[in-house]
Amino acid sequence: MKPLARLLSPVLLALLAFPARGGDAVAVGDYVVHYAAVATTDLAAEAARRYGIPREAGRAMVSVVVNTRGAAGEERPATAEVSGTAHNQIQQRVALDFAEVADNGTTYHVALFPYDHGDILSFTLSVTPAGQDRPVAIRFTHRFFVD
């Protein structure tokens, strides 16, 4: 596990709780894929300091969590392979280097990446739940601002 990834886990659940900051979910079959993108400067200063997360202008993170859905609709953690890219409006592309973070039975997939003020980034994610042959394709956009 990458060292930074170990430090991020305590704040990832909070990131996924804020859809207005670029988070959403996609349900495919028995799986639900939650994803969020947020500027690291949007993290609470105390939490970032406590866990050693650099709150840097022009740096953001995307996180992905995969759950299985039970018969009653309850969600349980699932494992998956996650990869992806982000590109801006002039097609400058960055490969997202996802690190896995295990926290309380949930596996978070986290990638840090740079951006410029006003960038509208288009994300393309490929999420393959364990035991599945076909990946779930997720595409979304998010606009970032430098504070």
Image (cartoon, rainbow, N blue to C red):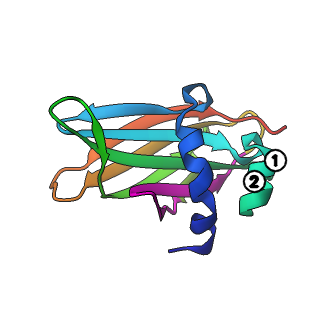
For the question of whether residue 54 can be seen, the reply is no
Q: Can you give x and y, in whole percent of width and height, for residue 94 in the image?
A: 56, 56
The residue indicated by pointer 2 is 48
Report which residue position mark 1 lands on.
45
Q: Where 43 sits versus 21, above or below? A: below
Q: Position of residue 107 (x, y in %)?
A: 41, 57
Residue at left 18%, top 39%? 30
| Majority secondary structure in the magenta region | strand
- Rendered image quadrant of residue 42: top right
Identify the secondary structure beneath mark 1: helix
Q: Give me the disc on residue 86.
A: none
Does any portion of residue 3 appear in the rendered image?
Answer: yes
Q: Amino acid at mark 1?
A: Ala
Q: Is residue 130 magenta?
A: no
Region rendered in magenta: 96-115
Q: x and y percent of residue 109 in the render?
A: 46, 56
Q: CA distance from mark 1 to mark 2?
A: 5 Å
Residue 142 at x, y percent in the picture: 59, 33
